[in-house]
């Protein structure tokens, strides 16, 4: 009888504590994962986080911008869009083959910007391939100008609909030759 | 188990956590505004509108002085351990940029690095006017972003500075120069974006500071550094500086100023090991002055080079060497005090403590 009474109090207390710990572990920045580090299973399953199934949910468009540069890299053109994101229509929910290119850009950009600390040979190889792919993709779309034999690519994120919001600069690539 | 008891316990638990977080945040804020033991605190109203605190530990009259500028998300406390290892004849001036600790940001315009440079030159002028810099040669030392700021300040205050020591400094081209740096800076961007609001609600308690501040383990200032990481003012200031400097560096910054004083670099071993291309940037810093050297502190990383108990003595030794070199040069005896403040309007000094 006494054990039952103790259980009746302890179980909700333990579950409430667990729930509170889970709520406090939902910060998007992993620097705030002090409580999750108490989960010694190493899987993060005891104190779950909203990133469990979608570690980096997509909420913005990825854009590539480029600028041309002189041989000594002292002069640059302005940053230009490589291509424009297609404005969305209702019909795109059903049929939107043009999305394929944007999705490819998104996937390549994800390879480059996620897991910045990952240094395994596989990650390194994937990143090298992604850099090459982006370089070739941009090279085919740029408008060359005399006196500017180099170009440089920048990856930015932009909401695409809220023009009051500034774009976020993610990455600037190394200089490459317009004509390889 | 009843639904009511679970709901009540959860609500009570969340409320208690929020209360603990807010109490921690307030405690951190109050503690981060205290002075430093052994230092005299002064306050200067700058032409930018900012009201800036600086801390002076007087050395020997006629002896050298070192003015220390901290990096992004760091305050004067970051330099305390190095200051402890500098000789008693050296005057040490530690400075908090506007927004950090007790320094107030009152500039009505958007932040730019030029604002911090201007404030630093006015702190220098104020300290010199108050005869706090000892009368000997004056060397500027800056860590990380502070390194770049003191480099620009030396160009903005010619004749007042006799040497620079840049401790693992930020270089305006480092994001263009190093792919690894660019990739790493993305994570910092997210941290900076969310940090200010998180700290307001006391989320500093949830940061794994044991790991974050392990570099300062054993330091008498370990606790002080940890608390400053929970103060919203630290996060707000860091966010402001990061937003500006991140875009500035992604765009390639601007060329380094040419200086007529020696520029020395103290490099963290971890930095030059993990990003070897950084060495070229350090050499560029060296070439921007009239001499100097690059010293690598063994076993150090970007933070421990200043706050690590094993590394701080090496950093202090490198600064001491630059001070000795500056004292040995005859030029400093004839230096002129330029009124850099006159371009910024009224400036006043008052004892804050």
Image (cartoon, grey):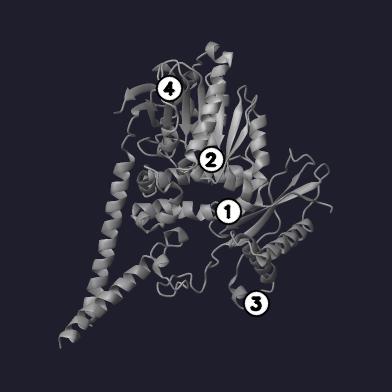
The residue carrying mark 2 is B144
Distance CA(mark 2)–CA(mark 4):
26 Å
Distance CA(mark 1)–CA(mark 3):
38 Å
Left or right placement of residue B254 versus residue B19 in this view? right
Say how many tags the image has. Answer: 4
Left or right placement of residue B87 versus residue A142 in this view? left
Residue B205 placement (x, y as % from top left): 35, 56
Q: Is residue A176 shown to the viewer in this render?
A: yes
Classify mark 1: residues with Cα within 10 Å, few (<14), some (14-19) or many (20+).
some
Q: Is residue A168 shown to the viewer in this render?
A: no
The image quarter in which residue B345 lies:
top left
Distance CA(mark 1)–CA(mark 2):
15 Å
Q: Chain of mark 2?
A: B
Q: Chain of mark 3?
A: A
- B225 relative to A88, above or below: above
Q: Residue at x 50, y 41 (%)?
A: B311
Which comes before the other along the chain, label 1 or label 4? 4
Left or right placement of residue A40 versus residue A88 in this view? left
Is label 2 or label 3 in front?
2
Is label 1 or label 4 in front?
4
Q: Badges 1 and 4: C-beta atoms under 8 Å apart?
A: no
Residue B202 placement (x, y as % from top left): 33, 55
The residue carrying mark 1 is B184
In the image, farthest residue toward the top = B334
Classify mark 4: residues with Cα within 10 Å, few (<14), some (14-19) or many (20+).
some
The residue carrying mark 4 is B89
């Amino acid at each position: 009888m006494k054990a039952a009474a103790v259980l009746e109090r302890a179980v909700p207390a333990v579950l409430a504590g667990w729930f509170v710990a889970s709520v406090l572990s939902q910060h998007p920045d992993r620097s705030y994962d002090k409580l999750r580090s108490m989960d010694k299973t190493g899987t993060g399953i005891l104190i779950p986080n909203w990133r469990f199934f979608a570690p980096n949910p997509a909420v913005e468009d990825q854009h590539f911008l480029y600028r041309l540069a002189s041989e000594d890299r002292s002069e640059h053109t302005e940053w230009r869009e490589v291509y424009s994101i297609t404005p969305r229509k209702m019909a795109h929910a059903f049929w939107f083959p043009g999305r394929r290119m944007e999705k490819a850009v998104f996937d390549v950009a994800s390879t480059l910007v996620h897991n910045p600390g990952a240094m395994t040979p596989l990650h390194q190889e994937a990143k090298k391939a992604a850099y090459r792919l982006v370089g070739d993709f941009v090279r085919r779309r740029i408008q060359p100008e005399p006196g500017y034999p180099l170009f440089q690519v920048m990856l930015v994120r932009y909401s695409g609909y809220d023009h009051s919001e500034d774009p976020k600069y993610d990455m600037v690539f190394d200089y490459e030759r317009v004509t390889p | 188990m009843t639904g009511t008891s679970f709901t009540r316990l959860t609500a009570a638990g969340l409320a208690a956590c929020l209360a603990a977080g807010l109490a921690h945040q307030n405690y951190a804020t109050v503690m981060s505004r205290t002075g430093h033991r052994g230092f005299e605190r002064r306050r200067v109203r700058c032409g930018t509108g900012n009201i800036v605190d600086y801390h002076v530990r007087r050395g020997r009259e006629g002896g050298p002085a070192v003015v220390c500028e901290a990096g992004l998300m760091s305050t004067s406390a970051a330099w305390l351990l190095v200051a402890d290892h500098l000789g008693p004849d050296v005057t040490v001036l530690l400075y908090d940029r506007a927004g950090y600790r007790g320094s107030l940001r009152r500039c009505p315009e958007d932040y730019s690095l030029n604002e911090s440079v201007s404030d630093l030159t006015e702190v220098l002028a104020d300290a010199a006017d108050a005869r706090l810099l000892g009368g000997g040669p004056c060397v500027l030392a800056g860590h990380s972003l502070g390194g770049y700021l003191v480099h620009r300040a030396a160009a903005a205050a010619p004749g007042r500075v006799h040497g620079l020591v840049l401790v693992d400094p930020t270089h305006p081209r480092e994001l263009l120069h190093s792919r690894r740096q660019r990739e790493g800076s993305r994570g910092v961007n997210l941290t900076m974006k969310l940090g200010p609001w998180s700290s307001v609600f006391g989320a500093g308690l949830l940061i794994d500071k044991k790991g974050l501040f392990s570099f300062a383990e054993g330091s008498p200032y370990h606790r002080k550094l940890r608390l400053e990481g929970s103060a919203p003012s630290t996060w707000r200031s860091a966010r402001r500086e990061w937003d500006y400097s991140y875009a500035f560096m992604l765009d390639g910054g601007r060329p380094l100023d040419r200086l007529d004083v020696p520029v020395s670099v103290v490099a963290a071993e971890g930095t030059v090991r993990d990003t070897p291309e950084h060495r070229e940037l350090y050499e560029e810093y060296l070439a921007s002055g009239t001499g100097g050297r690059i010293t690598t502190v063994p076993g150090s990383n970007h933070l421990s080079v200043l706050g690590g108990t094993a590394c701080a003595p090496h950093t202090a030794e490198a600064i001491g060497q630059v001070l000795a070199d500056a004292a040995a040069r005859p030029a400093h005896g004839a230096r002129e005090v330029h009124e850099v403040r006159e371009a910024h309007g009224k400036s006043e000094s008052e004892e804050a403590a």
